[in-house]
Image: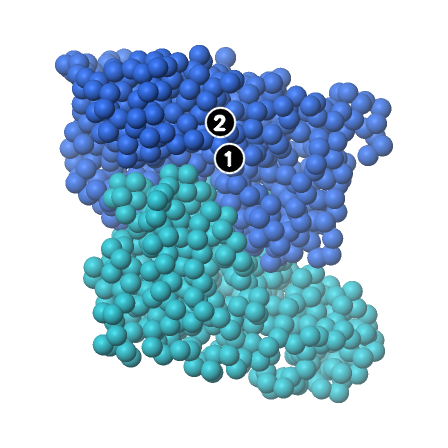
Chain colours: A blue, B cyan
């Protein structure tokens, strides 16, 4: 470790990890990164000796590391995204352990101060490392990273070889290491509060008294039509703001359903939505925390000094009745117009909204490309939206399968981004086998666009070819129509709004599954 | 549970589980079964109210159960194959837990008496259930199954919903329940022995004295060329039998390498190979146990009364030198002839063997269709074979990726069965992205053939359409060439031995990845 001591201030923790891996002879990294690994990705640009290999699924990354070890006789690293990412790689780590292959997993984790908040991707990573009978190295500070990686490589390359896991919290990754311990600032996050439950009378008093200084956050069963209508009435009666949690399990939408805004995924957005609130009333939702931690940004989204209380979901309608707010009046839906011309996230959303059938179920893993969908579909026919509750991508196609089995007479529409689709693509075969009435629209922007955005948001300066290559899906482009046909699902490719409309209409008209590969412009954060 | 009491002797444990699920209102099962779940599969034939839905990947099954629950408001079951199968489903169980979706996992496990033997698929299933913040129900006997399933459904459907896991050991599954506790026979398995390590002198004395009553079992680094040649010399000098462990991590093969037999995957076969042995000497291998347990068959494969000892791998060559056995003389390789006519497992193996390039790496997940490969490739040019060490299928394509990265100048050939290929199919994209020199041959027999075989082997009487449907991949047929093209890998389809030869030769000649979808006859156990 002596070689680093002369440049005490120049390295991020992620750079220390990359350099230590290289110093130990680990120069290949099979990667399926996410937000918490963006500084590691950025560090690759300054480390040309490290070869990053992008895999579309963590099981590919861990299996590749096993194969590498069996041939090279030395370990490769994997780069995995928190517990769910490591979970996807577990089965092949099991195979690797049975092969006595040395494998060094670098598993990104939430920033240390973000971990107690139980953000969606939080889980017990250590347990997964131990499950694979491997050593788990969780440094206690950024200064401990160098030693942790060294210990992991030593452990993996012992006799016999084994699986070693280094857990790399995001704040260590972006912090300086090894000389600079974490600033105290990171630990100054307010801790989550314990919440008092309101009864109907107390809730009525509070909301009447506070008006728009109060925010009701709806989740769980409160996001059905009745819950949303009750919330709208409460808003009408008191002025209290109402919001839906960021990723509801099942959200009623469309005509007759008040289009209540969701709390933003981006902490900046959520902070703005909650600003000025002195009272937060949770109705089936958890106290809001940001999805990830970011340098210098708060993880707890409750405004400073605000009180947090809860209301039982079962009391929501009763509260609306007690307050006597007017039933929301839906505006007369305007006939949606079909757009023409180039296909982009906006015209795509317009086509979906204009042609959405009554009582549809949308499995929504559209991610970045879906940004225009909520506004466009607000006055579409009544439908339900199923969202990515736990943040473990690759959920959309399987969830569509389950929804179609559960409700065989409702049209199911899977709005699926390209990167996430690749995780569990064989769900298409089950759609074909069961002849499920599912229309899959792949929002194909040829990129892990969310990560290109996150790479900027975590404050990384990465703009090199190596780091960008891990976020780019365009070499080669994935032809989802060809893959779908291979799994037995009829498929087409849409390159204009008109083509999408024609193909979407035809897919809905015909029973059984269909896939439309919607060619969006290649996403770039610039 | 009263409804079962009038038919005390008619139900297997698996039937009790299926019937209890139905009685609790769980009538859909998203399934990705394996050997240990075959009695559950068989039980479906007698339970027309239960709808089985085959998924090609466990993450599809668990995600589908989540989607089902969000729409139906009640749980579906999943059927998962031991720890590695559950591991593949974990990420979507994480999403399900965040959605508070009720999900009831039925996870098959080894027979209880097989579990302490650390067979390849053994792992800590409970830890995975707990990782998903769910309840884990591990009945203590077959008589406890009914109550365990009841408790799991109750737990999953509590407020809020959660993930509950029932662990279903194979012996409980095939045993009678709830009235008949397990026969004592199952517990009479001999326990694994502790092994004494031999030095070179003691090993030489033992093997000289015992001759063919001694068996050396080679594993780990002992399966390289030097190890295998030393073992062959020891055999020549003493008559001691030598075998390679069933699933070696890396096995040297071909010209100049003694073609030492592998211990059979089927316990019947292994028992025969080891019969008459009074001494077993392990060299880098574990004491042999059967992969799964089967009713009335032994799990420990060491013959009754045999001594088990070990020899350090580093002493293998020294022992051969001390014993002075002759160097094995390789027979002059006969020029391999290319077969003509229909493509079947035998002609496929002949084509691969005849055209195998020097110094190739074979990633072997050919499973049932690969039965003729070892004999055919014994006198092919020198090559290495990487096998499925941990039994968690879906390893072959990722391992090929890793091997090609590790050895960019060696041709890599992935011999991949169709069912297993679907697990981690997106590995093809990484092959294209990295332009890896990999030739993938899909041994496409349109079936989980190994499971059709296992269904018979576990002594199940299943022959109904419902159980067979879970082992059949022909509705719809998977067109791997189309899928490969979708992921950017040039692909062809071979339907005769001549076509396979032409396409295999062309794929090897051209740099970069290629896939050949080899259309084998549809497998059927009849």
Residue A1 position, x and y percent, is 82, 34
The disc label shown at residue A118, or none = 1
As rendered, which of B221 and A283 lies closer to the eye? A283
Q: Determine whether the residue tagged by mark 1 lies in a helix, strand or loop.
A: loop
Residue A408 position, x and y percent, is 19, 43
N-term-proximal mark, 2 vs 1: 1
Q: Determine whether the residue tagged by mark 2 lies in a helix, strand or loop.
A: loop
- Tag 2 subunit: A
Above or below, A318 relative to B332: above
Residue pointed to by mark 2: A289
Cβ–Cβ under 8 Å for marks 2 and 1? yes
In the rendered image, which quarter contains the N terminus of chain B?
bottom left
Q: Is residue B87 left or right of residue A295?
A: left
Q: Is residue A15 left or right of residue B172?
A: right
Badge 2 density bin: few <14, some 14–19, many ≥20, Cα 10 Å: many
| Residue at left offset 63%, top offset 61% | B251
- Tag 1 subunit: A
Asked if labels 2 and 1 share a chain, the reply is: yes
As rendered, which of B445 and A508 lies closer to the eye? A508
């Amino acid at each position: 470790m002596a070689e680093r001591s002369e440049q005490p201030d120049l390295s991020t923790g992620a750079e220390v990890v990359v350099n230590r891996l290289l110093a130990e002879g680990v120069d290949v990294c099979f990667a399926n990164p996410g937000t918490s690994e963006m500084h590691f990705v950025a560090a690759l640009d300054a480390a040309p000796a490290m070869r990053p290999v992008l895999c579309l699924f963590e099981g590919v990354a861990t299996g590749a590391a096993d194969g590498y070890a069996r041939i090279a006789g030395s370990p490769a690293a994997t780069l995995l995204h928190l517990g769910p990412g490591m979970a996807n790689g577990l089965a092949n780590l099991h195979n690797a352990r049975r092969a006595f292959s040395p494998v060094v997993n670098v598993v990104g984790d939430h920033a240390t101060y973000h971990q107690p908040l139980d953000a969606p991707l939080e889980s017990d990573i250590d347990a997964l490392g131990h499950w694979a009978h491997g050593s788990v190295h969780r440094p206690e500070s950024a200064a401990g990273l160098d030693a942790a990686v060294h210990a992991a490589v030593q452990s993996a390359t012992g006799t016999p070889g084994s699986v070693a896991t280094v857990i790399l919290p995001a704040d260590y990754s972006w912090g300086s290491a090894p000389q600079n311990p974490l600033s105290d600032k990171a630990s100054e996050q307010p801790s989550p509060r314990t919440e008092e439950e309101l009864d109907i009378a107390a809730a009525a008093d509070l909301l009447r008294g506070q008006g728009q200084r109060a925010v009701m956050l709806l989740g769980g069963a409160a996001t059905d039509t009745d819950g949303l209508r009750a919330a709208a009435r409460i808003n009408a009666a008191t002025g209290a703001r109402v919001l839906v949690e960021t990723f509801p399990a099942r959200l009623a939408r469309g005509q007759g359903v008040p289009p209540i805004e969701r709390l933003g995924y981006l902490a900046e957005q959520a902070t703005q939505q909650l600003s000025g609130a002195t009272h937060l009333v949770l109705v089936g939702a958890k106290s809001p925390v940001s999805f990830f931690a970011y340098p210098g940004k708060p993880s707890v989204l409750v405004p400073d000094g605000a009180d947090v209380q809860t209301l039982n979901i079962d009391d929501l309608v009763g509260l609306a009745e007690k307050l006597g707010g007017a039933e929301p009046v839906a505006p007369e839906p305007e006939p949606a117009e079909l757009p023409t011309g180039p296909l982009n996230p906006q015209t795509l959303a317009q086509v979906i909204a204009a042609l959405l059938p009554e009582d549809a179920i949308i499995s929504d893993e559209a991610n970045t490309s879906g940004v225009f969908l909520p506004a466009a579909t607000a006055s579409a026919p009544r439908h339900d939206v199923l969202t990515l509750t736990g943040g473990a991508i690759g959920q959309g196609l399987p969830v569509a399968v389950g929804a179609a089995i559960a409700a065989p007479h409702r049209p199911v529409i899977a709005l699926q981004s390209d990167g996430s689709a690749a995780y569990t693509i064989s769900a298409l075969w089950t759609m074909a086998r069961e002849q499920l009435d599912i229309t899959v629209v792949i929002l194909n922007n040829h990129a892990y666009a969310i990560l290109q955005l996150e790479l900027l948001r975590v404050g990384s300066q990465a703009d090199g070819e190596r780091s960008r290559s891990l976020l780019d899906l365009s070499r080669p482009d994935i032809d989802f129509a060809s893959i779908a046909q291979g799994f037995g699902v009829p498929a087409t490719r849409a390159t204009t709004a008109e083509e999408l409309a024609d193909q979407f209409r035809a897919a809905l008209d015909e029973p059984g599954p269909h896939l439309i590969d919607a060619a969006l412009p290649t996403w770039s954060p610039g």
